[in-house]
Image (spheres, rainbow, N blue to C red):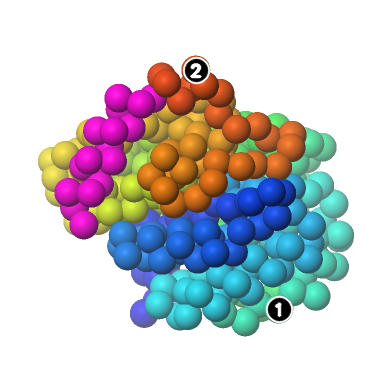
Amino acid sequence: MKLNHMLSGTGVALITPFKNGMIDYTQLETVIEYVIAGGVDYVVCLGTTGEAVTLTMEECLEVKQFTVKVVNERIPVVFGLFGGSFTARITERMKDYNLDGVTALLSSSPNYIKPTQEGIIKHYEALAAATPLPIIMYNVPSRTASNMEADTVIKLANQRSKIIGIKEASGDMYQGARIAAEVPDEFLVLSGDDLTTLPLIACGGHGVISVIANAFPRSFSLMIKAALEGNFEKARSFNQPLLKMYKWIFLEGSPSGIKFVMSHMGLCNPELRLPLMELSSAGKKAMMVDLEEAIACEKSLF
C-alpha cells in the first residue's frame, strides 16, 4: 500500500496516561487496543496530546518503543519528534533515535522564535536530510506563534522529498482549502483540528490526526470514512453527536478535556503533569449532558 494511503483517514494523537506522576503503561496499552478496535487507521505517539513536552527524552523513547510493541504492525505508527526552536539540536537528537517500527515522523514548525517563512523551509529541509523516514509537517500557530503560510507548504510539497504531508491546524479554512487544491495529489493534507476535519475533506483533504478519536474512535473513524467516500450525509450523521464535544474537550486546554472524558469512560486516569492541570469541576459539569449522549452513540456502534 502506498504511504499516502496508509496515512490517510483517521490518525489518533494518543494521550500519555499517568499514575502518581509516572507513565502508566498498563493504561496506555488499554488506550491503544481501544482505538485499534475502534477502527482508527494509524496512531501518533508523543504529539501535543501525548504531553511530550513534559516527558524526558528517555521517557519519550520508552513510550515510542512500547507503542510499537503493542501495535505490533497492525496499523502504522507515527512518531512525534521533540519540538523546539533550534534546528541543529533536533537533527542531532534524531541520530540517536531507534525508529524500528515507525512509519513516519510528525514534527511541528519551530516555536517561540517566530522564524521567517524561508527559515521554516530550511528547517524542514534540514530535518528531511537527517532521517531516512518520511516527515509530516505540523502547522499549529496557536502554540508555535508562527504560521506556516500556504505558499510555504506548497513550495515544500512540490519538492517531492521525504516531506510527505501537512497536519494543518491553523484554523484558517481558506488556507487549508488552498493547500489542498495546490499541492501534488500524493501529498497528504490532514486536519489538525477535529472540528475542521469534515470541511477540509470536502475541500480535498485526506483525513485527520485527531484528539477526540482517543475517546470516540468508532464514531469519528466512520465519519471520516464516509466523508472520504463522498457520502457527506452519512458523515454528518456520525459527526452530529460529537459536534459539541469538539468544544468541550478544549474548554480548558488540551489534553485536560480528553483525559477527563476518557477517565469518565474508564479508559485512563485524568492525571496530567504540571503546569497542565486537570479539568475543573465547572468544566466537567458543563459537558456532562453532551458527553453522555456521545458515549451512548459510540457504544451503539461497537
Whether residue 184 is visible to the viewer of this picture, yes or no, is no
State which tag comes first along the sequence, 1 or 2.
Answer: 1
Asked if the magenta segment contains residue 219, the reply would be: no
Say above or below: 189 vs 66.
above
Q: Choose between 244 and 125: the one closer to the eye.
A: 244
* Image side of residue 45 versus residue 203, left or right: right
Q: Choose between 105 and 32: the one closer to the eye.
A: 32
At x 37%, y 65%, the residue is 36
Element type where label 2 sits in the image = helix
Q: CA distance from mark 1 to mark 2?
A: 43 Å
Asked if the magenta segment contains residue 293, the reply would be: yes
Crowding near the residue tagged with mark 2, few <14, some 14–19, many ≥20 C-alpha atoms within 10 Å: few
Place of residue 52 in the rendered image (x, y in percent of width and height, measured from the top left) = 68, 52
Give residue 239's quadrant in the image: top left
Q: Which quadrant is home to the N terminus?
A: bottom left
Place of residue 15 in the rendered image (x, y in percent of width and height, measured from the top left) = 55, 51
At x 50%, y 74%, the residue is 70
**Farthest front residue in view:** 20
* Image side of residue 209 versus residue 60, left or right: left
- Mark 1 vs mark 2, foreground winner is 2
Mark 1 highlights which residue? 98
Magenta range: 287-302
Mark 2 highlights which residue? 282
At x 64%, y 65%, the residue is 63
Place of residue 302 in the rendered image (x, y in percent of width and height, measured from the top left) = 21, 57
Residue 17 bears which disc, if any? none
At x 69%, y 69%, the residue is 62
